[in-house]
Image: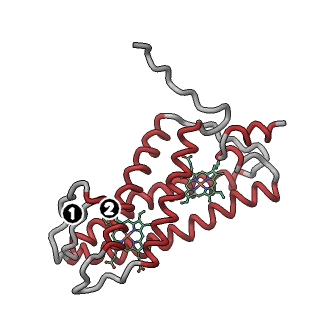
Amino acid sequence: MATPTPQAPAAGGYDATAKWLHWLVFVLVFAQFVVSILMPAMRRGTVPGPLINLHFSLGVLIFVVVALRWLRRLRRPVDLSMPDSAPWERLSAGMTHTLLYALLLAGPLLGWAAASARDFPVTPFKLFSLPYLVPAGTRAGFTAGDVHSFLMWTLLALIGLHSAAALYHHYFRHDGVLRRMLPSRSAGRASR
Ligand code: HEM
Ligand code: HEM
């Protein structure tokens, strides 16, 4: 059997898998916010219906995909030099990326604790059951729910900022920052 050769990162940027994972997370998170807006508020006596269960399932899936992406990112550092950008811009881009990862990993755990406190079973896509993270009725679990909701709306604002920055680079700075997250053919066109 041929030994698999490690996939080298695309010169000065993300490889195809990293790009796929980025846009997969985008689609999943977009769907999750649509579900979050449509699902009924969770109060005392709420019986979790299909939308609430979908919220849990998508949330667990997002956690898994982001964790894989984060681990992969740690193992494959990418050269993201932006010669035309000021140090504060590079710093804020790096901080935003770290914060996006942190919120996407901590958020689902807090949501899981909140679901446990509310005595809601978490059975992602009805495939398996997750154990309770905290016992039902735990005060800390309810607090986790408040923190979860607050952090997830903050995440949405941060995603807005991140997307606006990417579009600003593309349309006003005319540099390759957005293209390096797009399929390689567009990246190729950028260098011509
Ligand atoms: C990145 C993934 C997730 C996002 C973006 C997200 C987003 C949100 C948002 C925006 C709300 C507030 C809804 C409102 O204001 O009415 C919310 C509430 C909630 N979410 Fe999530 N969520 C995620 C993952 C999860 C997971 C994995 C679980 C459970 C396994 C979960 C359980 C809950 C619960 C129980 C609430 C109600 C909180 C409370 O008031 O106690 N979420 N979520
Ligand atoms: C759910 C929405 C999104 C999330 C959670 C997200 C998250 C991230 C993260 C964590 C990174 C850093 C990648 C890494 O180094 O591993 C990144 C990079 C990037 N994202 Fe997003 N992103 C989202 C949506 C978008 C959108 C809508 C755009 C474009 C309009 C975009 C454009 C980019 C670009 C161009 C980069 C590369 C930046 C660079 O090379 O410095 N992202 N994104």
Identity, as a three-letter code, of the amino acid under mark 1: Leu
Badge 2 marks a residue whose secondary structure is: helix
N-terminal label among 1 and 2: 2
| Residue 112 screen position, x and y as percent | 28, 65
Residue 104 versus residue 52 in the image, above or below: above
Mark 2, ligand 1, within 8 Å: the answer is: yes
Q: Quarter-wise, where is residue 58 in the image?
A: bottom left
Look at 62% across and 61% down and name the residue there.
162
Taking 144 as reference, is 16 above or below it? Answer: above
Q: Residue furthest top?
A: 1
Front-lying residue, 77 or 87 = 77
Q: Amino acid at mark 2?
A: Leu
Q: Is residue 148 left or right of residue 5?
A: left
The residue sitting at 21% across, 58% down in the picture is: 130
Numbered tag placed on residue 109 in the rendering: 2
- Around disc 1, counting alpha carbons within 10 Å, would you say few (fewer than 14), some (14 to 19), or many (20 or more)? some
Circles 1, 2 touching at the beta carbon (< 8 Å): yes
Left or right? Give the position of 112 relative to 153: left
Within the displayed image, which quadrant is ligand 1 positioned in? bottom left
Q: Residue furthest bottom?
A: 44
Residue 23, given in percent of the width and then of the height, sits at 56, 52
Q: Which residue is drawn at the image coordinates 77% and 54% (left, top)?
A: 170
Q: Secondary structure at mark 1?
A: loop
Distance between mark 1 and mark 2 Cα atoms: 8 Å
Residue wearing tag 1: 133
